[in-house]
Amino acid sequence: MDVNAAETELIERCRRNEPGAFEQLYRDHSTRVYSLTCRLSGSASEGEDLAQEVFVQVYRKLGSFRGEAALGTWIYRLATNLCLDHLRRRRVPGRETEPLDEAMPPATRTRPLTADAMDLERAIARLPEGYRAAFVLHDVEGFNHHEIGAILGIAEGTSKSQVHKARLKLREYLTRAPRKVTEADTRAGVRTQRS
């Protein structure tokens, strides 16, 4: 059975409320959805809440899934839209986000983040939401620009532009003010060549 046929069968099983069907759909997509919601929200706890809400929406809206895109693309579009709506509602100037090494699922965390990786995570969290969504979907999650266009409801060229602009902003954020090693970093054993 090919992927499309297996996916179609799983969707039909979910629509018939067969035992274990939605659980299988959840297992197939939950890790990537959680990673996406954590990165877009900038918080492990918000990411977890948003991931749960995504699957509630998937359950409620699966009957309206038309199959024009892959199921995963449709789910990630729901997740991205939910996160962007959440970010628009919560905009609070100067709000800090928790480090994303805490936000990553344990299976994807293989080693502690270095000072540079933590700087990158903070810089990603500072990106405008459209840039952040396109950047995370492309450079972190590995979607191509066509898929990102489908997920975000934008043109492929817009996706390319937003990823490019996100990279420029990240370069600006990361080179503007070199990070100093603080006393707390020293106690924690963090070292950076930029101190």
Image (cartoon, helix red, strand yellow):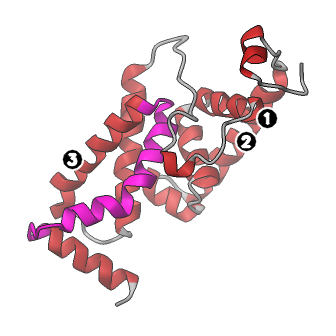
Give x and y (percent) for residue 35. 48, 46
Q: Please say if 18 is above or below 110.
A: below
Which circle, 3 or 2, is nearer the viewer?
Answer: 3
Residue at left offset 77%, top offset 23%: 189
Q: Nearer the viewer, residue 190 or 89?
A: 190
Q: Amino acid at mark 1?
A: Arg
| Mark 3–mark 2 CB contact (< 8 Å) | no
Residue at left offset 81%, top offset 16%: 181
Secondary structure beneath label 3: helix
Residue at left offset 52%, top offset 57%: 148
Q: Amino acid at mark 3?
A: Val
Write down the residue under mark 1: 171
Query: Image quarter for residue 120?
Result: top right
- Whole-angstrom CA distance, mark 2 to mark 1, is 6 Å
| Magenta span: chief secondary structure | helix
Q: Earlier in the sequence, mark 3 or mark 2?
A: 3
